[in-house]
Amino acid sequence: MTQSFKERRAALIALGLDLTPEMVAGTVSLTAPDIDPAIYDAVAVTKDLSYGAHERHVLDVYAPVAASGAERPVLVYVHGGGFVRGAKDSDQTPYFKNIGSWAVQQGWVAVAINYRLAPEFAYPSGAEDVAAAMTWVIDHIGEYGGDATKVFLCGQSAGSMHVADYVVGHGGYGPHGRALAGAAIVSCLYDVGRATRKDMHLAYWGADVSAWPERGTLGGLIDTDLPLLCTVSEFDEPEFQDHATQFAAEWHARKGGFAPLHLLYSQNHLTPVYAIGSPWDAFGPLLSRFIDANA
Amino acid sequence: MTQSFKERRAALIALGLDLTPEMVAGTVSLTAPDIDPAIYDAVAVTKDLSYGAHERHVLDVYAPVAASGAERPVLVYVHGGGFVRGAKDSDQTPYFKNIGSWAVQQGWVAVAINYRLAPEFAYPSGAEDVAAAMTWVIDHIGEYGGDATKVFLCGQSAGSMHVADYVVGHGGYGPHGRALAGAAIVSCLYDVGRATRKDMHLAYWGADVSAWPERGTLGGLIDTDLPLLCTVSEFDEPEFQDHATQFAAEWHARKGGFAPLHLLYSQNHLTPVYAIGSPWDAFGPLLSRFIDANA
């Protein structure tokens, strides 16, 4: 961490808001070196456990090396990648071993999942896979020190939309029901009917855009009783800022009060999850308090 | 700090959202004991400097005991109190010696001002007093180690409305012009035309409510080029949550993007400023980054 906050902010601004390959690579280059290696200490990772029939139906469990009891809150992380790419972990970057490991340092157990991708698999395959992974978690997380009554889902970007779909029931639930203590939704498009007709959206939500409105989660999230922690980043793409504003406006109109929607200062679309475990982390402390409050 | 975050949150919820005398006293009792005495170390306070003719035209300066140069950012704090009460400091509570002292620990110089109160003095007396205090600050803060080109105004509740009025020019500026590097606005009613007709509002904005709409700051804040840091608290009174939502919606409609509006998790109307210097502080770290980014 050799930058000042002002320099760091300027570097993020220079990368722009558009999620080009260069912007993504630049964000990784900016963020990855600052992750504290200490977050990986005493963390046991159990990789590629199967939670379904497809090769993408695999998950990793992060637990303390010396786990005892089954009382830890559980964080289940659902990666982003525009519905068409992304993974629970990587050989090239710390993502998202950083989240699983950092979660263990918070006193939790963590699970990071892969799920089927578009265009081969379309809506609501992501939410169905979240439901299958949740079933696995409820059945097995006690073996790793996790408390199955304190499970929190967290997703970013496309992952946040799979989480939102799961919360509102678009993918159905498994035999345990919703089985959630809370959901964290990082940079989400809530009103699918208003989403841009870009290729990755068409790949997941389908070529028939007349079906998109019912695939939105805005109303369901406002109506749910589940504790929510939603975020939008200061340097998020305009579409995400647009949907976040709409979420706040409709939440207030329907339910009163300010939506559980947090603006992340000096963060872009990726840094809320890429900076976890680094001194630039803004989302992690908020997630930690949210889980403390609701576990 | 003997409470867990969950216990602290429950204690705040138990106090309720309404700003009754009991709620205010309960918030002070909850928050004041956790302020770290170390924030007062090596802080020199110069009290009751006059910036105008009225007895309320006084301000306190917080500077390092061993100040050198004139390069520190300057935080000017404007207290709340429903237009009709409140003060820059108190013999009974740490408020707001906590803010001035904490600011010095951040590497800044701070100024806390009194201003004339309603009903004797009505709109725009608060903003006029902010303007007079700003003139004093620009003229004199260099003597205390402050940089007059890096002045940030911060107000809470009624104080935030005086700050907002100053930013949009409702009180006029002094000989130095606006002379601000940024403004922090904590729990504000932006659209005065929609404000409740409660006694303290009538006392300041006047009995003629037809004049209230033009006294709002919503449009002026959206149009300004000044860096803003606005907040609303999760446990703010509903009226403040209402105005904050409207601010976000109108900002997006007129300017695009998400408004510079931060939801403060597990904070009530008072704690953003009452918890500064304590482990429960949520607003301070944000203000610190905002000033780092814009100084």
Image: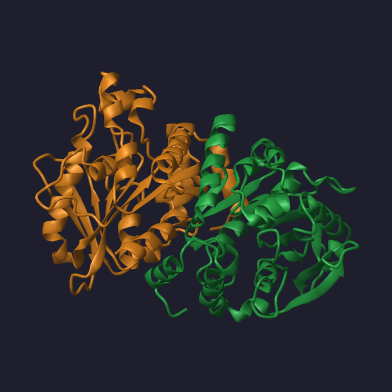
Chain colours: A orange, B green
Q: How many marks?
A: 0
Query: In this view, which residue lies farthest toward the front?
Result: B207
**Residue occupying the point 21% across, 72% down:** A67
From the viewer's perspective, is residue A177 above or below residue A85? below
Rendered image quadrant of residue B21: bottom right
- Where is residue A135? Give x, y as percent: 13, 51
The answer to whether residue A285 is visible is yes
Rendered image quadrant of residue B120: bottom right
- Where is residue B143? Give x, y as percent: 87, 66
Position of residue B92 in the picture relative to residue A117 (left or right): right
**Residue occupying the point 91% across, 62% down:** B53
Front residue (pair B69, A187): A187
From the viewer's perspective, is residue B7 above or below residue A171? below
**Residue occupying the point 75% across, 58% down:** B119
Front residue (pair A82, B247): B247
The answer to whether residue B182 is visible is no
Position of residue B260 in the picture relative to residue A163 (left or right): right
Front residue (pair B36, A144): B36
- Where is residue B18? Give x, y as percent: 51, 61
- Where is residue B196? Give x, y as percent: 59, 48
Front residue (pair A14, A265): A265
Position of residue B83 in the picture relative to residue B67 (left or right): left
